[in-house]
Amino acid sequence: ESDDHDGVGDLGAKRTVSASVSLGGLSDDDVAVELLHGPVGLSDELVSPTSLVMTAAGDGRFTTTFELDRGGRYGYTVRVVPHHPDLVTPIELGCVSWA
């Protein structure tokens, strides 16, 4: 869910995105919910996206606000990855879920 409705933004505009994640038996601390956002290419793909860790708001809801670093068409996606201090990278277990 985003406060943006047309996928086009002005340089410096702020956007807020929230996600509801069904975690099953996991807690908010067991995962990192990341927002990837950036300009949109000709095939509607994200071009060189920026990644932000979203903040847990409780009950599987996560939110973040970001500022557009360029104007024009942009997009975003959310991914959920394991989070633990002993992991070298969040994707080493191969447990990534995209939205």
Image (tube, rainbow, N blue to C red):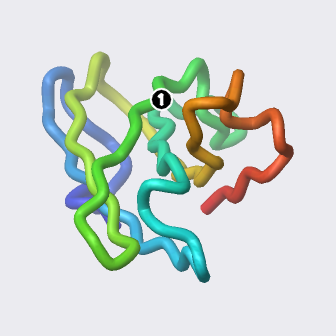
Work out whether 45 lies above or below 39. Answer: below
44 up-or-down from 2: above or below: above
* Residue where numbered disc 1 is placed: 51
Quarter of the image where the N terminus is located = bottom left
Query: In x, y percent, where is residue 76?
Result: 48, 45
Asked if residue 94 lies left or right of residue 48, the reply is right
Q: How many marks?
A: 1
User: Residue at the location (35% across, 29% down)?
Assistant: 72
Instruction: State whether residue 96 is above or below residue 92.
Output: below
Choose top left, top right, bottom left or bottom right for residue 69. top left
Q: Which image quadrant: the C terminus?
A: bottom right
Most distant residue in the left direction: 13
Which residue in the rendered view is the most extreme toward the front? 86
Q: Given the image, on which type of amino acid does mark 1 rest?
A: Ser
Residue 85: quarter of image:
top right
Label 1: how many Cα within 10 Å (few below 14, some 14–19, many 20+): some
Q: Position of residue 92 (x, y in %)?
A: 81, 34
Q: Residue at x 24, y 34 (%)?
A: 66
Picture layout, residue 62 above or below residue 39? below
- Residue 9 drawn at (x, y percent): 25, 37
Q: Residue 77 appears at what percent x and percent y?
A: 53, 49
> 92 or 42, which lies in front?
92
Image quadrant where residue 41 sits: top right
Q: Secondary structure at mark 1?
A: strand
| Residue shown at 33% from the left, 70% from the top | 61
Q: Nearer the viewer, residue 43 or 80?
A: 80
Q: On the picture, is 57 further left or further right than 28?
A: left
